[in-house]
Image (cartoon, grey):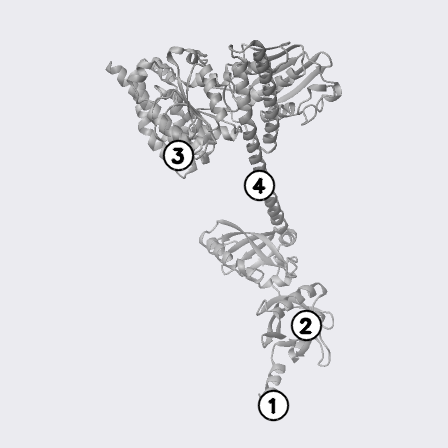
Amino acid sequence: MSIEDDLFVHLAFDRAGVALSVTDTAGRVLHANSAFRELFGWSATDAIDISQISRPEDRAWTRAYIERLVRGDDDEFHTVKQFVRRDGSEFSGAVTIRPIVRDGRCVGIVGVVIAAQPRDLVGDPRVGKLLEHSASTITLADAAGNVMETAGRYRATLGYPREFWEERTIFDILVPDDAERVLVMRDAVLAEPGGVFVDDFTVIDADGERHVLEVSAVNLLDDPAIEGIVITSRNVTEERAIRAELTALRDEAVAEADQRARLVATVSHELRNPLHAITGLSELLASDPSLPTSLQDLAAALHRQVTQLTLVTDDLLDAAQLEIGDGGLRAGPTRVRQVVDDVARLGRAVQKGGRVAVWSTVDDQVPAIVDIDGARLHQLLLNLVGNAVKFTHDGEVGISVTSRRTDDGRLQLDIAVHDTGRGIPPEDLDVIFDPFRMAANAGDDRGAGLGLAVASRIVAMLDGSIDVTSEVGRGSTFRVSFPVGLSDEPTEVPRGHQMLTNAADRPVVLVVEDNAVNQDLARHQLTRLGAVAVVVGTAEEAIELAAERHFDAILMDHQLPGMNGRDATRELRRRNVTTPIVGMTASATAADEQACLDAGMDAFLAKPVGLARLNETLDALITRQTPAARAEHPERSAGGRAVSAVDVDTLATLADELGNPAIVISLVETFLGELERRRAAIAGDDPEQIAREAHTLKSSARLLGAVRLATVCEHVEQDPSRAPLVHDQAIAAERAFRSWLSERTQESAR
């Protein structure tokens, strides 16, 4: 460029009608034209710095946007702000600045300042104060996103002064990564007038710091009183940080709980397997009449000690499971007297020397069957009775059960466990329900100190209360109360032990167990109960054998080499094998039990399993049938096995009530005709339809005695995400109903 050209450019710069300036990267003015000096009141000889023409409160963010230009973060910056003249007066001006780049580096900044007339604030001062002091920022924007009005004009926001917000769009403060999401939200807002859209976006404040804003937008462009998009935003940076931290902590806690749950499950399995073998073998020896009395007594003592060890182990594992939240409730029909009698029997088994009488009484007003978690009730009473027996060397331990109606009409069970033992000192009454705490006078009878702690937690889960009264030297009484529901299950009592003690018709039980000691124990236990045991070591063997020949029941371990017990059960049900299957496993959590039942098993026994529990479970499941009938119908896996999925007595009762069995047959056929469609609907994706179909299927299934299917449908009705549970139960019910219909057809033919 020639000297003449250089002079021409300099003259043009100086004579320009707008205020122009060139500054270095530190903000010192290197050149300013006449319009600039006239606007700001500075002479040509005065040295000027950007800070001198900015208000003190604006200097930090002014420096920040200059630094962004110098770094190359922005190619241009435009804002409206208050400027300061040399005489101290202020004026509003619109400024646009750009970097001067040489060899890829910013060497200076050129700026243009135009005096501007700020827009008037809202006429109503109350609205102005509302905008000024609102916790959230309220903004009115046009369809292009230009700010028409904002609370930022009434108070500093994100470190920017009020003037900054005169001519803004969201993109002026938005991080580039969020620009596309803003456009998506804008399009959605424009497409749906009146609709509310909410999302989080990250913006940059005057100091260059990032903040998260929760932005809500509603399109009121068609509203003549507004004619804009109303945007509400609030700074949720700290809230989101706390949420992220809490989420991380929760994930860590869940991972830790999962590890602890796996540890508990592993320890439980490893302990219960040998305990199952020792308990069962010692019980068999103690009741073997071929042994001398002295050896029987030794075996009985061993059995008592192992039973006590099992109780302590259960307390430790139960406490761990409750601590990690792996101890939820699973309510169902429960026979109160049966639970109480079983606990009393176990109490007599573990008492020392035969000098303690263990008795129980259930008031006649107590319903035969109540709706409660039967396993937890059994566990609660066993812990209380076990504690009473342990601290009573002579005398008695009694269980009494009564019921009453509360003021709000709920049914309440009141249970008292009384003993004539050593009693509890008054100063220890407040701590005996704490883990690992025992009375000072426990002496040699000290245990793990967990039985009462577990009992207390179970009572809390049952929404009940527990208390104790005691007198040293005279004994203690523990009282628990909790609400229960009435069950609509049939109230017929089990048939007793006739099925397993009838030698003329010995049931055949398939035992699926890979542990050699447990295999031998199962053989002896079933023989003692009058049954024939067929033992296999793998699920694959069991599947082939059960498909080829008749068995009255299957005892299925879960952890097997190759296919596990639950998968084997599903495969058997898929092959239409309806034989009752009892899960008998060392994995003893409520989740394990539910998983076994969901797989299609009919019952669940947690090891160790004694003769009484095994007999009771098999007796309740196996339907008696003469050998001739079995030979006549070999294709039926367990002759009349419908009882495991359908209560045939309910069908008979319904026929009596309707006065015509043909009507019941028609109802069953109609049910089967609709079952596939309803099952398909429940397997769909619409939660509302799933709940409706589950409700309808529940009602018809319960009417016809398919109680297990009805129960599963009730769970699905309350929680549609559990819909997959219906599949196996529906198949089992269908098989059972078709078997029942086949029997009715054969009866008619005769």
Query: Which residue carries the number 3 mark?
Result: 682
How far is mark 1 from mark 4, CA to CA?
Answer: 77 Å
Q: Amino acid at mark 4?
A: Ala
Q: Amino acid at mark 2?
A: Gly
Query: Which residue carries the number 2 mark?
Result: 27
Query: Dots 1 and 4: beta carbons under 8 Å?
Result: no
Q: Residue furthest left?
A: 749
Helix, strand or loop at mark 2: loop
Query: Which residue carries the number 4 mark?
Result: 255
**Classed neighbour count for the residue bearing mark 3: other residues with Cα under 10 Å, few (<14), some (14–19), many (≥20):** many
Query: Which residue carries the number 1 mark?
Result: 3
Helix, strand or loop at mark 1: helix
Query: Dots 3 and 2: beta carbons under 8 Å?
Result: no
How far is mark 2 from mark 1, CA to CA?
Answer: 28 Å
Q: Amino acid at mark 1?
A: Ile
Judge whether 177 appears above or below 265 on screen: below
How far is mark 1 from mark 3, CA to CA?
Answer: 89 Å
Residue drawn 36% across and 29% down?
544
Judge whether 384 appears above or below 161 on screen: above
Left/right of residue 634 with respect to residue 447 in the rendered view: left
Of the two numbered discs 3 and 4 on the same chain, state the one appearing first in sequence.
Answer: 4
Residue 335 picture location, percent across and down: 50, 16
Of the two numbered discs 1 and 4 on the same chain, state the one appearing first in sequence.
Answer: 1
Camera-side mark, 3 or 4? 4
Q: Disc number at residue 462?
A: none
How far is mark 4 from mark 2, CA to CA?
Answer: 54 Å
Q: Quadrant of the C terminus?
A: top left
Of the two numbered discs 1 and 3 on the same chain, state the one appearing first in sequence.
Answer: 1
How far is mark 3 from mark 4, CA to CA?
Answer: 32 Å
Of the two numbered discs 2 and 1 on the same chain, state the one appearing first in sequence.
Answer: 1
Of the two numbered discs 4 and 2 on the same chain, state the one appearing first in sequence.
Answer: 2
